[in-house]
Image (cartoon, rainbow, N blue to C red):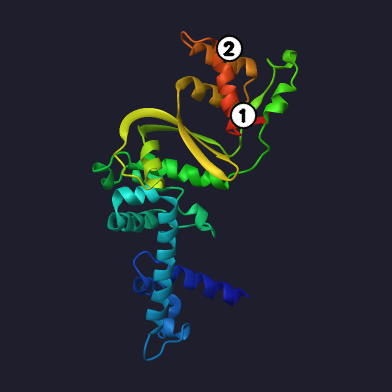
Amino acid sequence: MKKLKKLESLLYRLITAPSGVAEGIAAERHLGADGLDAIVLGDDRLSAEARLEIYANMYFYRLLDALKEDFPATLTVLGDDNFHNLVTGYLLEYPPTEPSVFYCGRHLAAFLRDHPLRDGAPFLADLAALERASVEVFQGPDAAALEPDSIRAIAPADWPALKLRIHPSAQILALDWRVSELLRAVEERRPWKPAQRGAVKVLVWRRNARVFYRDLERAEADALEAAGGGARFAKICDLVAADAGNQDPIAAINRLLARWLSDGLLTRG
């Protein structure tokens, strides 16, 4: 068993070697005179190194395909060649550390923050962040959403102390670029336009196994973030009232509450 584990570790290092199998072999000084031939059987058609190179290519292209699936809008903006080069550099900087491909794209937005490709599309990092959040929300934890009947059953005297939490899978992103419409255009196979600069908070949530996202006005963002932090309903109402302006604050909180319930966004604290 110990020998098997050593062999598996060696093959993994060679297959995932950043500079290719040949350089990976050169770094494994303990292989001895026979090198890889002592481990992998070659023949007249393919050497041991060539056989292992096939697996190395399969490894990279499996990750590339997974990232294309998770970041379709980033791929569309960059094009195939630039996206291929982006992923090559990204995997050198952030090699996978988990068995599941779910995790392989979790650092792509951070990697894009200072990447030269942003010179032509400065919104790329925010776009990738929204796409990654969509993946995480889809895979996120589940919880029973509050239904309107449950809310109506709460006694009026209990409302001020009530704790309403947002669904545990939901995320609120603080972005510098308004990338929601660009992502929606790509998803709907419509022509897309570069995102406009502008600070915005974006809600990403799941309802009935589907992921949704939308830009938030300040009052709603403040209220949802407070709910996410465990604030009581009275505090949430105060935040909405502070941003209501000339609107009736009671009508404003009723509209938000109805929308959150319709979205399946709330759970009981």
Q: Is residue 241 above or below residue 213?
A: above
Q: Is residue 223 above or below residue 136?
A: above
Image quarter for residue 80?
Answer: bottom left
Which of the image's four quarters has the N terminus?
Answer: bottom right
For residue 247, side relative to residue 119 (left or right): right
Image coords of residue 101 (percent x, y): 50, 57
Label 1 near label 2: C-beta < 8 Å?
A: no
Residue lying furthest left: 120
- At label 1, the amino acid type is Leu
**Which label sits on residue 261?**
1
**Which label sits on residue 250?**
2
Q: Label 2's element?
A: helix
Q: Residues within 10 Å of mark 1 (few under 14, many from 20)?
A: some
Image coords of residue 230 (percent x, y): 63, 25
Image quarter for residue 19?
Answer: bottom left
- At label 2, the amino acid type is Ile
Q: Residues within 10 Å of mark 2 (few under 14, many from 20)?
A: few
Whichever of labels 2 and 1 marks the residue nearer the N terminus, that label is 2
The answer to whether residue 228 is visible is: no
Residue drawn 41% across the image and 80% down it:
51
Residue lying furthest bottom: 44
Which of the image's four quarters has the C terminus?
Answer: top right
Q: Is residue 121 above or below residue 253?
A: below
Between 210 and 121, the one nearer to me in the picture: 210
**Disc 2 versus disc 1: distance between alpha carbons?**
16 Å
The answer to whether residue 30 is visible is: yes
Between 57 and 251, the one nearer to me in the picture: 251
For residue 8, side relative to residue 183 (left or right): right
**Which label sits on residue 251?**
none
Q: Label 1's element?
A: helix
Image coords of residue 264 (percent x, y): 61, 34
